[in-house]
Image (cartoon, rainbow, N blue to C red):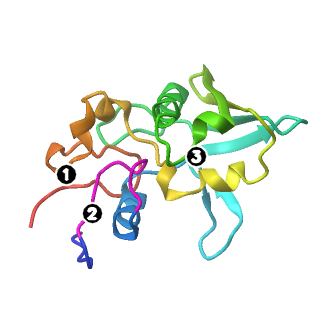
Amino acid sequence: MRVAQSSDIQSLDPWTASDDATITVLRQVYEGLVDLEPGGLRVVPKLADSWTTSADGRTWTFRLHPGVKFHDGTALDAQSVARNFARATAFARFDLATLVTSVAATDAQTVVFTLTVQYAPFLATLASGSFGIVNPACFAQGPAWSMSASRCAQGTGSFVFETGA
């Protein structure tokens, strides 16, 4: 499918995208742990089938949907999710380093976030299009991976990004 927009996308990296045109396209390529229900504000599962939070609200445990693969056929696992969030702590835009103490893959399908403080909107925050999970093979290529010429937009979404006229 080809889509015409009022402007070009600025990056293939959902974590650095800040304009509507880019985020709209990348939400089709990458998926997050959770999403908002269509037309509503209720948080629903996406890559995570389920989640729990500790009594103190500081530990969030997500169980990933089994069998999900990135566009190149690589399996999505908890380590991939943890690597995305570890990479993002360097982005001042999210200020994750002050909120998230750690993100750990406790097994292949379970990822645990430990927060510095209880943060009620944490789950809704994860539903943002900016938190789409990227195949770590892309960002392992270095900073240039997110340029459209690299063609390394590997997510788990319904659409695969391709350049061309």
158 left or right, relative to 72: right
Picture quarter with the N terminus: bottom left
Picture quarter with the C terminus: bottom left
Could you tell me which residue is drawn at 30 percent across and 51 percent down? 12
Cα–Cα gap, marks 3 and 2: 23 Å
Residue 109 x, y percent position in the rendering: 59, 29
Could you tell me which residue is drawn at 67 percent across and 57 percent down? 44
Residue 164 x, y percent position in the rendering: 10, 61
Labelled disc at residue 33: 3
Q: Is residue 12 magenta?
A: yes
The quadrant holding residue 141 is top left
Instruction: Look at mark 2 in the image and give the residue it sits on.
Output: 9
SS of the residue under disc 3: loop
Residue 159 in the image: above or below residue 7: above
Mark 2 and mark 1 residues within 8 Å of each other at the beta carbon? yes
69 left or right, relative to 47: left
Residue 94 x, y percent position in the rendering: 54, 47
Mark 3 and mark 2 residues within 8 Å of each other at the beta carbon? no
Badge 3 local density, few (<14 within 10 Å), some, or many (20+)? many
The quadrant holding residue 134 is top left
Residue 9 in the image: above or below residue 59: below
SS of the residue under disc 1: helix
Instruction: Look at mark 1 in the image and give the residue it sits on.
Output: 148
Q: Amino acid at mark 3?
A: Leu
SS of the residue under disc 2: loop
The quadrant holding residue 59 is top right
Depth order, front residue of 38/87: 87
Question: Which of the two discs, 3 and 1, labels the residue nearer the N terminus?
Answer: 3
Cα–Cα gap, marks 2 and 1: 9 Å
Specify start and end residues of the magenta stretch as a single range. 8-18
